[in-house]
Image: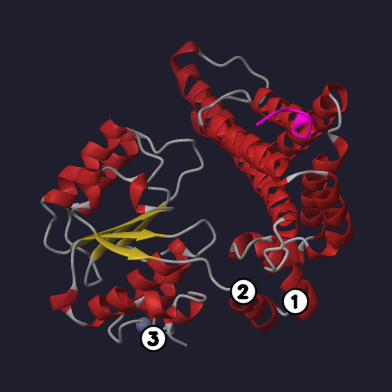
Amino acid sequence: MSVWEAVTGQDDRLGPLKAAAVDDGAMTHAWLITGPPGSGRSVAATAFAAALECPDHGCGVCHSCETVLKGTHPDVTHVTTEQVQIKIDEVRHLVASASRLPGTGKWRIVIVEDADRMAENTTNVLLKSIEEPPSRTVWILCTPSPRDVLPTIRSRCRHVGLRIPSVEAVTRLLADRDGVDPEIARTSALAAQCHIGIARRLARDPAARERRDQALALATEARSVGTAVIAAGRLVDAAGQAAKTTNEERGEREKAELRQALGVEEGARVPAQIRSQLTALDKEIKGRTRRVLRDTLDRNLVDLLSYYRDVLVLQTRAGVQLINQSRARELAQAAETSSVAATLRRLDAIGQARTRLGMNVTPALAVEAMAVDLAYADTRPA
Ligand SMILES: [Zn+2]
C-alpha cells in the first residue's frame, strides 16, 4: 500500500510532493504544508518523508517506509511541541543536527509540526538553515495557514495547501479503516467538521461525545449573568480536569525518572545544586497542562460555533447541511426565538473568546465574558 493512501481526501493537492519524491529536479529543500487543523498536515508530511527515503518512492512496505512511518528512521526528525511555543534552544539544536549528512537514507529530513508556535527570534535561527540549506537536508514545516509563518520563511518554501476533507471522505475512512458503524462515522465526521483526529475520537470514545454535548449545552444554559458564570465555570473545570488527567500520570512518571537519574530518593530533600533541574521539569509539565487546557477549551468553543452556525443556517434558510443534525429541533427553536443579528453577535462573542484564549487571557475570564455575551445577545443593540 502506497504511503500516500494514508492522506485522506487530498488527492488533487499532493501533486508537487509526489513529483518531488520521484524526480530530484522537482525537489526543493524547504516545504510549507498548510491546512486547517485535522486536514492531515503531519500525515502528509510523514508520507512525503517516507516517499523521499524509499527506493520505490513510498511503497509503504519496505524497511525505510516502515521506519519513517513509525518515527524511528534515523535521518527523519519529527518535531512536535506540547508547549505553547517551540523553544529557541530546541531549534538551535535542530539546525545543528540538520546540517549533518544523512546516515543511511537519501535525505536528512526535519518535519516541524506547529511551525507557527515559534517566536520571531526562534524563527530567525531556522531561517539561516533554510536560506543556505545543506545539500541533502529537507525542511518540512506545517502550519494552519501560510500567514502563520514570517514572510521571509514563506518566500523560501514551496507551498502545498491541504483542504478540509469532505464528509464522505472522512466517513469512509472511519468506516473502512477503523471499522466504525457507518451512521456513527457520519455523525462524527459532521460534528468534527471533518477534522480527522477529532472525528475519530468522537466515533470511538463515548466520553468525547459527552464532552462535546456539554460544550453545546452552554448555548441553552447561559440565560443570565448567574447561569452564564456557572455554565462557563463548569466548562473550564471540565477542560482543566481533562488536561490534568492527560498529564498528571505522565508528569509523575517523568519526575520519578528524573529523581532516579539524579540519585534523589522519593521524599528526600533535594540538594540545592540539582534543584533547578526538577524545577525546570515542573515548569515544563505545567506548561504542557496549560496548553492542553487551552486546546480543549478552544475545541469546546469551536463546537459552540458550530451550534450557532447551524442556527444561522436555519435563520437565513441557507439550505446547507446542519453540523449538529441530532439537535435539529433544539436548533430550530433557537432560530425561531432569536434574530440573525443576535446570532451574529453570539458568533462574534465566541470568536473573541478564542482570540483571548490565544492571547493568554485567563481561561475562566475569557469564557465567562463570552457566556455573558451569549446570554444577552438578544437584548443588546448591534
Ligand atoms: Zn518503501
On the image, numbered disc 1 is attached to which residue?
Answer: 180
Mark 1 surroundings: few (<14), some (14-19) or many (≥20) residues within 10 A: some
Foreground residue among 344 and 175: 344
Q: Secondary structure at mark 2?
A: helix
Q: Which is nearer the N-term, disc 3 or disc 2?
A: 3
Mark 3 beta carbon near ligand 1 (under 8 Å) = yes
Tell me the kind of residue under disc 2: Val
On the image, numbered disc 3 is attached to which residue?
Answer: 59
On the image, numbered disc 2 is attached to which residue?
Answer: 170
Would you say 131 lies left or right of 64 here? left
Instruction: Please name which of the two marks, 1 or 2, marks the residue nearer to the observer.
Output: 2
Q: How much space separates mark 1 and mark 2, taking CA atoms?
A: 11 Å
The magenta stretch is 376-382
* Rendered-image quadrant of the C terminus: top right
Q: Is residue 309 magenta?
A: no
Q: Secondary structure at mark 1?
A: loop
